[in-house]
Image (cartoon, rainbow, N blue to C red):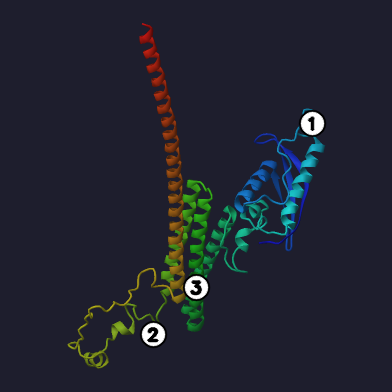
Amino acid sequence: MTAIQSVLISGYQERLEPKPHTVYQIEIRGHVRSWSIWRRYSEFDDLHTELVKGTGSPPPASLPPKHKYSILRSHSDPALLEERKTGLETYLRAIISAKEDKWREAFPFKEFLGIPIGRQAGVAGGPPTQFTLTSWLDEHQELQNRLRDVRADINKREALSDQGDVSASHKSNVSAKQKLAGVLSRIGTLGKGLTELAMNGMSEGELQRRTDMVARLQDDCEKLGKMVIVARQFNRSGTDPSAPYSSASTNPASASDREALLGTTNTFTRVTRVFGQPSKPQETEVTRPLDDVGVFGLQQTQMQQQDGQLAQLTTILGRQKQLGQAINSEINEQIVVLDGLANDVDRVGDKLSKASRQMHRLG
């Protein structure tokens, strides 16, 4: 997290849309940079609610009263606005200077001040592990840029290969593989971050759009992975052996030379599988273009996707549990009401019986 040195509410401004309201300008100063944001009182109130809900206790200072307006003072009274501005500034400074850091380290507080959470959540200089709606898009753009770098390395490899510089071509190919493996691991983190944003209330349409964006990144990685392993093979004369008029096709080896090199064609070894012995792992179209680091990154990505799906399932089951508990509570309340009604019916029935007996005696 960006360390906050000071917070100051420097002023306020009246705005007319969507309806008349007042916004306050917050000046934030950090170690590296400073910035300012505008927030209205209702956003302060929402922040306070989230902090109390997330930490279990209210912040050190309380917010100014929500409706502190008298009959003789209007909403645009400068004295009233200055009083509220001072109270809001005291509220923020109390959180930043508090001995306990649970309020200032809370995600809602960081998002409220516009702190770049995504870039600071991971290790220093590493990829982000927690996202806001904006930082998620920034990370997606960063991965697109890295994929363009992979394409540039592949094109450079081809150009160097055409020039006959085998060593430099190999280095470009290795660089492309390493960059692609890094992108694969970060795509998994991006997908996990999208799952967390969805659980925090992202709209269904926006979730689908961003899911498609992640899928396109994965498709690009698969295509580039296939391109990485496609390297031109040259023979000693510098020509492609698969060319239709190469020396390999126009001057084939004699039968005796082929037999001396490959052995007799009648000799073969029968391949059988021993019962109980596991078969060797098979390459797939996805794993074939990857090295060890890439395969490990792919495994991490798949595990993170499975964890995200399990998290979604856990959330759904939690909601179903709450719904079931609410239904059970409602049924219990209805049972109590019905029991009370049955008692009332019995009591009225007893009274009617007594009244009937008295009427018979009088008659």
- Determine which residue is flagged by label 2: 235
- The image shows residue 172 at horizontal and vertical percentages of 51, 77
In the rendered image, the quadrant that contains the C terminus is: top left
Q: CA distance from mark 1 to mark 2?
A: 91 Å
Relative height, residue 329 to residue 274 (above, below): above
* Disc 1 + disc 3, Cβ < 8 Å: no
* Disc 2 + disc 3, Cβ < 8 Å: no
- The image shows residue 314 at horizontal and vertical percentages of 44, 54
Q: Under tag 3, what secondary structure?
A: helix
- The residue located at (39%, 68%) in the rendering is 286
Q: Nearer the viewer, residue 5 or 280?
A: 5
In the rendered image, the quadrant that contains the N terminus is: bottom right
The label on residue 73 is 1
Label 2 crowd bin: few (<14), some (14–19), many (20+), radius 10 Å? few
Q: Under tag 2, what secondary structure?
A: loop
Relative height, residue 353 to residue 86 (above, below): above
Left or right, 199 with reference to 271: right
The nearer-to-camera label among 1 and 3 is 1
Q: CA distance from mark 2 to mark 3?
A: 24 Å
Q: Nearer the viewer, residue 54 or 358?
A: 358
Q: CA distance from mark 1 to mark 3?
A: 68 Å
Residue ranking furthest to the front: 361
Label 3 crowd bin: few (<14), some (14–19), many (20+), radius 10 Å? many
